[in-house]
Image (cartoon, rainbow, N blue to C red):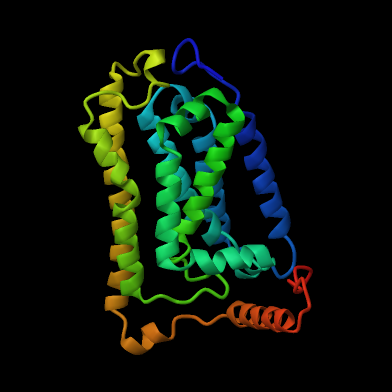
């Protein structure tokens, strides 16, 4: 759908007004059950993540990102990858997180996502692929395509944080140095496209200039500012988290660092994986994912 009129003309975005309330309602229902109750801190984190998600996928940011400004698109992507996933995941009680990641397909994806190299490759492919000229143009013309791309970007955000979040069931516990190094690499590799934006002397996205300028900025200036926003924000967030992780590890003794939590959900997940491997070896397929437990 092509935008017309003023950049800040109001548009109703049904996805945000439907998806986010449904998400909050499902969270409230799930965490109200015995065994899955959330702490006050977890509820606040999840609510904050849902609010950031709402801001990212509704007017005005969603409309500006789709039709008017590359800088708005970059801001939307930053919220969907750097802010929403860690807030939502850390807002989940451990038993609920274990239940949600128990199905075989999700667990298999999780086992891959928690490895730094596949995580970096996945985030890079999604970040660059969804910011090609053809992808941005498609998103500006089709609401369905735009929502699909936003969902893909959000999922890549979960992949980005998976090697760092220590509460994921059955995930290997990387050392603080490994997690910090991973975040530093993750801040550099996927955002190389921002360098192209900064030094380009013409607009690379024809879907934006057709609608004039935003806040008095030319399309080229908007593109250059988008490059700086992408690069500096990613470095600021991921390097800060890396610094906090390594600083906390530095003040801990080696023994304390080695006792990084082995939870019952980790033991249970490994047992389930062993049972699936055993069923596979005995030719029993599909293996039972114990999803109903």
In the displayed image of the protein, which residue is found farthest to the top?
A: 5
Q: Is residue 36 left or right of residue 263?
A: right
Q: Is residue 14 left or right of residue 3?
A: right
Give the position of the N terminus as an image quadrant. Answer: top right
> Residue 145 at x, y = what percent?
57, 33
Q: Is residue 172 left or right of residue 94?
A: left
Q: Is residue 280 visible?
A: yes
> Residue 110 at x, y = what percent?
56, 65
Q: Is residue 240 visible?
A: no
- Toward which corner of the image does residue 215 lie, by quadrant? top left
> Residue 218 at x, y = what percent?
28, 18
Q: With respect to residue 204, does 41 lie above or below?
A: below
Residue shown at the point (60%, 35%) measured from the top left: 16
Residue shown at the point (50%, 42%) measured from the top left: 52
- Toward which corner of the image does residue 122 lie, by quadrant? bottom left
Q: With respect to residue 84, does 139 lie above or below?
A: above
């Amino acid at each position: 759908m092509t935008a017309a009129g003023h950049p800040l003309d109001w548009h109703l975005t049904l996805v945000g007004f439907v998806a986010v309330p449904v998400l909050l309602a499902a969270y409230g229902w799930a965490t109200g059950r015995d065994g899955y109750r959330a702490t006050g801190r977890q509820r606040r984190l999840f609510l904050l993540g849902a609010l950031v998600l709402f801001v990212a996928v509704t007017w005005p940011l969603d409309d500006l990102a789709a039709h008017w400004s590359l800088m708005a698109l970059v801001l939307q992507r930053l919220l969907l990858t750097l802010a929403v996933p860690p807030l939502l995941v850390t807002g989940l009680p451990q038993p609920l997180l274990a239940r949600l990641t128990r199905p075989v397909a999700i667990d298999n994806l999780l086992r891959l996502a928690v490895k730094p190299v596949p995580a970096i490759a996945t985030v890079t492919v999604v970040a660059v692929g969804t910011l090609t000229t053809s992808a941005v143009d498609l998103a500006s013309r089709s609401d369905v395509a735009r929502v699909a791309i936003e969902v893909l970007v959000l999922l890549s955000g979960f992949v980005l944080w998976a090697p760092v979040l220590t509460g994921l069931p059955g995930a290997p516990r990387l050392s603080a140095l490994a997690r910090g190094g991973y975040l530093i690499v993750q801040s550099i590799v996927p955002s190389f496209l921002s360098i192209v934006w900064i030094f380009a002397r013409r607009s690379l996205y024809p879907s934006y200039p057709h609608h004039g300028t935003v806040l008095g900025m030319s399309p080229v200036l908007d593109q250059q500012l988008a490059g700086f926003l992408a690069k500096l924000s990613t470095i600021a967030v991921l390097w800060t988290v890396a610094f906090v992780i390594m600083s906390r590890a530095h003040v801990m003794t080696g023994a304390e660092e080695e006792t990084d939590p082995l939870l019952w959900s980790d033991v249970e997940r490994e047992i389930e994986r062993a049972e699936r491997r055993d069923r596979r070896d005995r030719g029993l397929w599909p293996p039972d994912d114990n999803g109903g437990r």
